Amino acid sequence: MTRKSTDQMFDPANYAQVGLPLDHAVTLQPWCYTSEDFFRAEVDGIFMRAWNFFGRVERLPNPGDFFTVDFVGVPVLIVRDQQKRLRAFANTCRHRGTQLVCGEGNKRAFACPYHAWTYGLDGSLRGGRGIDDLPDFDKSQNGLKEFRLETWGGFIFVNFDERAESLLDWLGDLPEQMASYDCENLVLSKRAEFDVACNWKSHIENSVEDYHVPHVHSYTLQQIQGGYEHFYPETKGNWLVMRERHEGTRALLTEDIAHALPRITTVEGHAAEGTNFVCLFPCTLLAFTTDSMWYIELHPQGPWLTKLTVGMCFPRSSVQRPDFEEKSAYYYKRWVKAVAEDNGITELQLRGLRSPFARPGRITDLEPLIPQMGRWWIDRVMRQHQAVATLVR
């Protein structure tokens, strides 16, 4: 990309119509989905400052349980320590930077595979051959870099910015609005991971509009019986919601409705009337319906690749039923089919957006959250770019 085109990419005039009322709003510029330079600006302006979603606490029930992720180029280690506290660390040895561990499992300590510097579950440096002979070397100052980790409702969030607001401030009124789902007592029953050749923004945009359903999901979700109304209530905090009012559950295909599990006993108000599809910024879907919930966890790997995880959760009372394994299989069937269809269409979208002839398009009244999402992302990218430009001058 030439210097001129890079300057154009960060010219506010190119985003003047993003976030306007629906009758005038347009999509983001194609380069927002395809450019390495723009993605790097997203990492610095969004992901290094946001509360990023990392699934459920049930993945780590015991001391020593851990899992690792590669998130926007940052290797992250999440572990439950001996005091049963969840902690997040840079998955990088303090000696010469080797990644300490891969995958998930249980360990009493973490030993670097290169030179065997060893760290406790609390991130402290325990030892390494030769370090006791180093002059002016303080082990207490050479533990793993720790990141802020906070939870809400059994969900894990990590923030790389030590100065960021608290998670609850970030969430705003989301915990209050979703309180009757009793998220603390949900149980993660299944996870599925996918590598999707799409831009992360395309996938979360797709999750909160029904415009695509008759076309992309014509033989699956479109066949779910019963009408429904859409609502887009105001929210406080870094989230938006598409609310549907309908009978029954949105978590089963019509052909499988006879296998429905009981409703969540605590749901009331709007939660009892249908489904809430939450876009939790920067890039998480939380879908709450009357008998279950699922989430889509997006880990951008660059502008052209996204690691996607679907987590499927049910009330503890449902998981403890003797027929849960049999009935939950029908829920998984619906989720896997729908996600595969969404993955396919967002991959096709990226192929089209990479064309030199791609241009921003008009937004219809059937996708009202798209302009708000675009404005949230652009504002943070532009703010970071302007701050960097000021420092460079």
Image (cartoon, grey):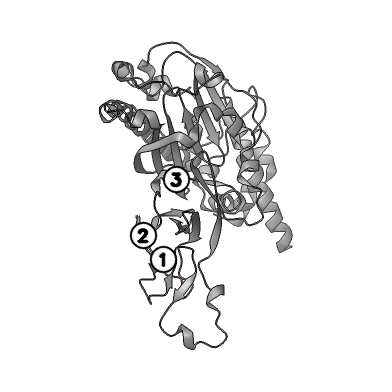
Disc 3 marks a residue whose amino acid type is Val
Q: Quadrant of residue 197?
A: top left
Magenta residues, dominant SS class: loop
Question: Which class describes the residues within 10 Å of circle 1: few (<14), some (14-19), or many (20+)?
Answer: some
Tell me what residue is drawn at x 47 percent, y 85 percent: 132
Q: Position of residue 134 (x, y in %)?
A: 51, 87
Residue corresponding to mark 2: 102
Magenta residue span? 95-99
- Closest to the camera, between mark 2 and mark 3, is 3
Give the Cα distance between marks 2 and 3: 19 Å
Q: Position of residue 30 (x, y in %)?
A: 53, 40
Q: Position of residue 108 (x, y in %)?
A: 37, 64
Tell me what residue is drawn at x 73 percent, y 58 percent: 390
Question: Which class describes the residues within 10 Å of circle 2: few (<14), some (14-19), or many (20+)?
Answer: some
Query: Taking 12 as reference, is 332 above or below it?
Result: above
Disc 1 marks a residue whose amino acid type is Gln
Give the Cα distance between marks 2 and 1: 8 Å
Query: Taking 41 as reference, is 218 above or below it?
Result: above
- Closest to the observer: 389 or 102? 102
- Closest to the camera, between mark 3 and mark 1, is 3
Q: In this orientation, does residue 150 appear?
A: yes
Residue corresponding to mark 1: 99
